[in-house]
Image (spheres, grey):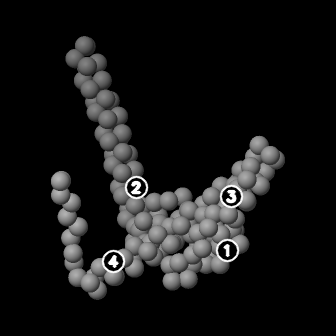
Amino acid sequence: MAHRIITQAVIVGARVFGRAFAEAYRQASASSRYAQASARGGSGSSPFANNFASAGLTLDEACKILNVPPPQGGKANLENIMERFKRLFDANDPTKGGSFYLQSKILRARERIELEVKQAQEAAETEAELKQGWKPKVWKDR
């Protein structure tokens, strides 16, 4: 009689473990497919934009939120952007009766514009390096 109980316990345990393992595999597979799809497409101009919370915000929306012109050729007046950001961010402070939602939208807009400017600068640096030829930066201890 004891061997029957032990056998049933082992079978039930194996079934539970098997189902849990199968569900974990399904979730991992779905997560992997989602990550691949996000890296391929998405709202940003590069896969790096998908790593930020500002990825859902287009550059046009970000510029409208902060009321600044979009960066032209990867250059923007960052002082003007920071001035508007600080003014709007402080005006929407929840402790002063403002909206946390609007405050977070303002923050994401600034991040999005800074991301675009940074990506454009990196692309320009890479292109300039390609035109000049590869010159490694060597650091020596002196």
Q: Is residue 117 above or below residue 15?
A: below
Q: Amino acid at mark 2?
A: Ser
Mark 4, Cα crowd under 10 Å, few <14 / some 14-19 / many 20+, is: few
Q: Residue furthest top?
A: 2
Mark 1, Cα crowd under 10 Å, few <14 / some 14-19 / many 20+, is: some
Residue 80 image position (x, y, % from top left) = 65, 69
| Left or right of 25 in this view: 93 | right
Q: Identify the residue position indicated by label 3 in the image.
A: 86
Q: CA distance from mark 4 to mark 1?
A: 27 Å
Q: Nearer the viewer, residue 130 or 135?
A: 135
Q: Identify the residue position indicated by label 1 in the image.
A: 68
Q: Identify the residue position indicated by label 2 in the image.
A: 31
SS for callout 2? helix
**Which residue occupies 50% across, 59% down?**
52
SS for callout 3? helix
| Left or right of 52 in this view: 136 | left
Which circle, 2 or 4, is nearer the viewer?
4
SS for callout 1? loop
Going from the N terminus, do you reach mark 4 or mark 1 first? 1
Going from the N terminus, do you reach mark 1 or mark 3 first? 1
Q: Is residue 67 above or below residue 9?
A: below
Going from the N terminus, do you reach mark 2 or mark 3 first? 2
Q: Which mark is residue 126?
A: 4
Residue 137 is drawn in which quadrant? Answer: bottom left
Residue 32 is drawn in which quadrant? Answer: bottom left
Mark 2, Cα crowd under 10 Å, few <14 / some 14-19 / many 20+, is: few
Going from the N terminus, do you reach mark 1 or mark 2 first? 2
Q: Nearer the viewer, residue 72 or 97?
A: 72
Q: Is residue 112 above or below residue 126?
A: above
